[in-house]
Image (cartoon, rainbow, N blue to C red):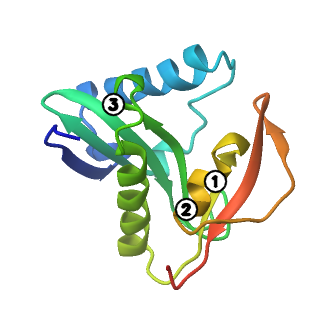
Amino acid sequence: MSSKLTWQCCQFEELQAQPLYQILQLRAEAFVVEQECIYQDMDDYDQQAHHLTACSEDALLCYSRLLPPGLKYAGPSIGRVITRHSVRGEGFGKLLMQRSIDSCHERWPGQTIFISAQQQLELFYSSLGFSTQSEPYREDGIPHIQMLLEYPFA
């Protein structure tokens, strides 16, 4: 992780055209092309979300979408978690999730955080304190599990 990262967390209406384009491009690259998953990525939650990004120079390396309580789950949720393929395995995913958790805690203090995690990443999310709350289910053709991080956070 030698690159200096610039973090930003903003609401949809604060996003400029170029950063929004980079976010949508990275989401399509990871979820549609790389995972060969045809699904409707733009799901009308983006407009009510906070968008957490990490850039090195002008390249978007990490992204997650933070949804407020009551929109998709009872508490806040973290989704669309992505690290650019070229930097995977360098610790950016863990750093992104720690920042995502901190951002949720700042915006919605004292609330349990929900995620719908790809089942293959269960150990990764467990290492961050999330606990599995469901049997595997298919979402967009990929096995997922519901997990949550209960307040107070570990």
Tag 3 residue: 20
Tag 2 residue: 127
Q: Residues within 10 Å of mark 1 (few under 14, many from 20)?
A: few
Question: Which of 127 and 27 lies nearest the eye of the viewer?
Answer: 127
Q: Name the element at disc 3.
A: helix
Question: In the image, 106: left or right of 133?
Answer: left
Residue 91: x %, y % from top left:
36, 45
Question: In the image, 148: left or right of 81?
Answer: right
Q: Residue at x 26, y 45 (%)?
A: 14
Q: Residue at x 34, y 30 (%)?
A: 87
Marks 1 and 2: in contact by CB < 8 Å? yes
Q: Residues within 10 Å of mark 2 (few under 14, many from 20)?
A: few
Q: Amino acid at mark 1?
A: Leu
Marks 2 and 1, how far apart at CA: 6 Å
Q: Name the element at disc 2.
A: helix
Tag 1 residue: 123
Compared to residue 110, the image places residue 13 above or below, namely above
Residue 56 occupies which quadrant of the picture? top left
Question: Which of 1 and 142 lies nearest the eye of the viewer?
Answer: 1
Marks 3 and 1, how far apart at CA: 30 Å
Residue 3 occupies which quadrant of the picture? top left
Q: Residue at x 59, y 75 (%)?
A: 112
Q: Amino acid at mark 2?
A: Ser
- Sequence-wise first label, 3 or 1: 3
Residue 126: x %, y % from top left:
61, 61
Q: Residue at x 73, y 57 (%)?
A: 146
Q: Name the element at disc 1.
A: helix
Question: In the image, 112: left or right of 98?
Answer: right
Marks 2 and 3, how far apart at CA: 30 Å
